[in-house]
Image (tube, rainbow, N blue to C red):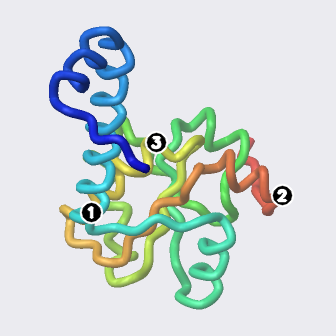
């Protein structure tokens, strides 16, 4: 039979286990924040396999926002390198791709989200962020090219 917990027991638990309760509150807040930001995000995420489908079906373009050093070590074939640090000054390189699907890549997937927000603000409608970035791409043994 379920046992009812009154408020006194709840506050006693919180008082005795305040670190656990603070940890629960922080994790709950971060989870809620992620859910809410995902609802209002105007770009989508895609897996490496999903990116290949987009490249084949929709003639998508890949924008790699890695720094040149990382880009030269290996990037998706025919990817355009626009480093996140210089994104605002190099955004004109994207004009030929207006109306096309854009897949954003970076080494781990963290910078891609920032670039996705900027591209949506610039008016691009079909923006996809590569989940896990180039790390996930390489883990799936997908082809890359290196620049000298």
Q: Quadrant of residue 143?
A: bottom right
User: Would residue 93 appear left or right of 106 to someone viewing this image?
Assistant: left
Out of 14 and 30, give the one closest to the viewer: 14
Q: Secondary structure at mark 3?
A: helix
Q: Earlier in the sequence, mark 3 or mark 1?
A: 1
Specify the label residue 141 is tagged with: 2
Q: Position of residue 27 (x, y in %)?
A: 36, 33
Q: Quadrant of residue 50?
A: bottom right
Q: Position of residue 41 (x, y in %)?
A: 27, 63
Q: Secondary structure at mark 1?
A: loop
In which quadrant will I find the C terminus?
top right
Tell me which residue sits at (25%, 11%) in the image: 15
Specify the label residue 41 is tagged with: 1
Compared with residue 68, is residue 104 higher up or lower down, i.e. above or below? below
User: Would residue 142 appear left or right of 107 to someone viewing this image?
Assistant: right
Compared with residue 77, is residue 16 higher up or lower down, i.e. above or below? above
Out of 114 and 148, give the one closest to the viewer: 114
Specify the label residue 129 is tagged with: none
Q: Which residue is mark 3?
A: 110
Which of discs 3 and 1 lies nearer the camera? The answer is 1
């Amino acid at each position: 039979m379920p046992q009812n917990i009154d408020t006194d027991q709840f506050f006693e638990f919180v008082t005795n286990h305040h670190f656990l309760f603070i940890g629960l509150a922080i994790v709950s807040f971060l989870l809620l924040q992620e859910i809410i930001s995902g609802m209002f995000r105007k770009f989508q995420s895609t897996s490496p396999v999903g990116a290949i489908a987009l490249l084949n079906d929709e003639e998508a373009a890949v924008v790699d926002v890695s720094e040149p050093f990382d880009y030269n070590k290996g990037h998706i074939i025919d990817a355009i390198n626009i480093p996140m640090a210089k994104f605002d000054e190099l955004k004109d390189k994207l004009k030929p791709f207006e109306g096309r699907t854009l897949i954003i890549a970076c080494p781990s997937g963290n910078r891609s989200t920032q670039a996705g927000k900027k591209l949506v603000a610039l008016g691009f409608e079909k923006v996809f962020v590569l989940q896990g970035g180039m790390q996930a791409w390489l883990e799936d043994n997908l082809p890359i090219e290196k620049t000298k």
